[in-house]
Image: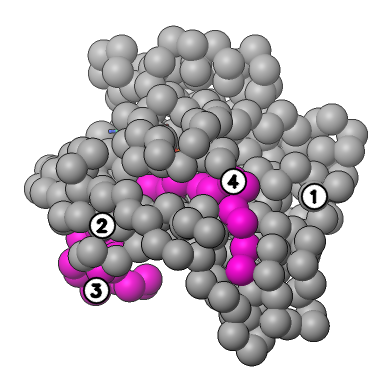
Amino acid sequence: MTNRLWQLAARPEGVPTAEHFRLVEEEVPAPGPGQVVVRNEVMSVDPAMRGRMNDVPSYVAPFQLDQPLEGGAVGTVVASESPDVPVGASVLHGLGWREYALLDARHTRVVDTAAAPPSAYLGVLGMPGLTAYAGLLDVAHMKPDENVFISGAAGAVGSLAGQIARLRGARLVIGSAGSAAKVKYLVDDLGFDAAFNYKDGSVRTQLKQLTPDGIDVYFDNVGGEQLEAALFRMNLHGRVAVCGAISQYNTPDARGIRNLSLLISKRITLQGFLVMDHWGRRQAFVEEMTGWLRENKVQVPETFVDGIEHAPDAFLGMLRGENLGKMIVRF
Ligand SMILES: NC(=O)c1ccc[n+]([C@@H]2O[C@H](COP(=O)([O-])OP(=O)(O)OC[C@H]3O[C@@H](n4cnc5c(N)ncnc54)[C@H](OP(=O)(O)O)[C@@H]3O)[C@@H](O)[C@H]2O)c1
């Protein structure tokens, strides 16, 4: 049987392109003791993968040149040498970017695809969902009746952070996104109180108009200009959960934040975080999110790109904002 998988062909400087990826074929390997072979059905493309294309030390190892890329995926076990994870089981694991993944069974987690579709474990019930939940509640310590601003609000993390803020009793939930259609979706479908297109002129002016009583919590997915604008609008003792800085991932020499002295006068807390430090909250998060889903209180936007041969297109498209909610590659 033939396996198709994507390798890192070259390291990008600035915006990655198709030339940085290479599709190769190999034989599907047989599992050794304790191992399984998984036929992937869906895989995630994440902004963090852009960071792993750089050869720099970080919290997760960089992708290696001429080696397969990695990332979250869900599939079905088709061969198993592990009594714990039998053939037919659906599993979540970290070896996406390939049709068949060979890995130790202990590096997989069995998921219930009758209870939720496979893509849910890469989004609303998975890493992005927990990021939104922990960032908002444990890092920014959002409380009822607070004013919340979320950038990147129409993406995987942002769309959930905004809905969690609403369900947890925020007084005002404001979002930003990169198109008129996304802005409309945030208000009409996800229940944001208001939203704006950060490409429509001054972010600072638009945010000021929508937050007459200031911002208590800012969930920052993009950094740069929007972080600066939010700091101007933060209330006394405001909290910023610094989740991501996607506006700078392809432009490392982007200019800095010029108003950090506001942290002093307004006693603002600016707290960076990584979801991997919050796995302890997974059970509480899954329970609460499952309840909201059952009661139809949370919408789950997803954008699908079909075919492993289009995986780089999905990744590059996500970086350009072509996704509404979670970007998923469907095999
Ligand atoms: N700290 C953690 O543990 C953790 C975990 C997961 C994700 N993250 C971070 O959270 C953020 C969102 O991740 P995600 O997986 O939910 O991705 P996503 O929001 O689903 O997709 C990325 C989005 O970024 C937006 N974008 C691209 N360039 C931008 C720019 N210059 N300025 C503003 N927005 C831009 C695009 O939407 P528009 O159309 O709106 O531009 C695009 O849809 C990322 O920064 C990611 O690195 C952090």
Q: Name the residue under label 2.
A: 8
Q: Is residue 280 magenta?
A: no
Q: Position of residue 209 (x, y in %)?
A: 42, 15
Q: Where is residue 198 in the image (x, y as percent from the top left)?
A: 34, 21
Nearest to N terminus: mark 2 or mark 4: 2
The local crowd at label 2, few if under 14, some if 14 to 19, many if 20 or more residues have their Cα within 10 Å, is many
Q: Mark 3 points at which residue?
A: 57
The local crowd at label 1, few if under 14, some if 14 to 19, many if 20 or more residues have their Cα within 10 Å, is some
Q: Indicate the amino acid at tag 2.
A: Leu
Q: Which residue is drawn at 44% across and 10% down?
A: 180
The local crowd at label 4, few if under 14, some if 14 to 19, many if 20 or more residues have their Cα within 10 Å, is many
Which quarter of the picture shows residue 91?
bottom right
Q: Decide: marks 1, 4 in contact (CB < 8 A)?
A: no
Q: In this view, does 262 lie to the left or right of 180?
A: left
Q: Mark 4 points at which residue?
A: 42
Marks 2 and 1, how far apart in space? 31 Å
Q: Is residue 249 left or right of residue 269?
A: left
**Which label number is shown at residue 113?**
1
Q: Residue at x 23, y 64 (%)?
A: 66
Marks 1 and 4, how far apart in space? 12 Å
Marks 4 and 3, how far apart in space? 28 Å
Q: Is residue 94 in view from this perspective?
A: no
Q: Decide: marks 1, 3 in contact (CB < 8 A)?
A: no
Q: Indicate the amino acid at tag 1.
A: Thr
Mark 2 Cβ and ligand 1 under 8 Å apart: no
In magenta, the rendered stretch is 37-64
